[in-house]
Amino acid sequence: MTEFVKKIAYGDLEPFEVLDYIKKLMPKREIPDFAANLKVTAFIELMPSMAGCRILTRPQAERLITVADYIESNLSRLQDNPEPSTERAKKAFDLAIFAGFMEKTETGYKWLYNRGSHVSLAYFLVKVYNPTLVKNGDEVPFTPLGELFGKKRLDSYAGKAFGVKKPQKWRKGIDELLEKI
């Protein structure tokens, strides 16, 4: 048993600290295996036949299971290939890729339209996730979408897209694309 696993079992690290540490330490595709290995270690420790050989107490073994469950419940945030969250978004993303507005990468997506402008990306996302209330972006999940595109604070860029007196010319391309959905 590694020192890292012992630290987890002894309660030296909180579950979120473990998750942050392993995100830095190992490739994302190996994180589910790490969680499974924590559970296997815990279950071996809890087996009655191992009573004389135990390294961990029952509460420590149960803590390993709790941390493994926490890691597994947060795996969706760590996906290697995250996906849009609604059917409309999936169709819009597919159309945008086909039209050359964006491309799929190993870690998510890259916005290409309007020279990769954050403002045009935010406009696209609002139009995809909230087509009827265009000026109210409250229903748009900007944080996870920002992670998909490797961008932060897309909500502030949405304000810049809609807070103009004269609509930008690049809007027409996005509007025409989304009419096809």
Image (cartoon, rainbow, N blue to C red):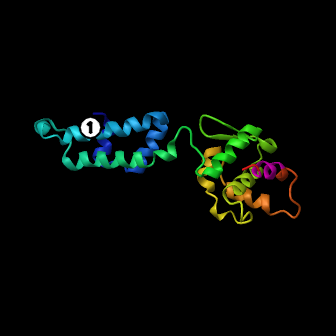
Element on which disc 1 rests: helix
The location of residue 40, given as percent across then percent down, is 28, 37
The location of residue 59, given as percent across then percent down, is 22, 50
Q: Is residue 82 above or below residue 131?
A: above
> What's drawn in magenta, residue-wise?
173-179
Determine whether, in the image, residue 166 is placed left or right of residue 124.
right
Magenta stretch encompasses residue 177: yes
Q: Residue furthest front?
A: 180
Magenta stretch encompasses residue 176: yes
The location of residue 38, given as percent across then percent down, is 32, 39
Residue in the picture at 84% in, 52% down: 172
Residue in the picture at 63% in, 62% down: 139
Q: Does the rendering let one see residue 150?
A: no
Q: Is residue 76 above or below residue 165?
A: above
Q: Nearer the viewer, residue 131 or 110?
A: 131
Location of residue 31 (image quadrant): top left
Q: Does the rendering let one see residue 148?
A: yes
Q: Nearer the viewer, residue 125 or 30?
A: 125
Location of residue 162 (image quadrant): bottom right
Determine whether, in the image, residue 20 is placed left or right of residue 92.
left
Which residue matches tag 1?
Answer: 41
**Quadrant (top left, top right, bottom left, bottom right) of the N terminus:** top left
Q: Amino acid type of disc 1? A: Thr
Q: Is residue 119 above or below residue 46?
A: below
Residue in the picture at 64% in, 59% down: 140
What kind of secondary structure does the magenta stretch mostly adopt? helix
Q: Nearer the viewer, residue 12 or 60?
A: 60
Residue in the picture at 66% in, 54% down: 153
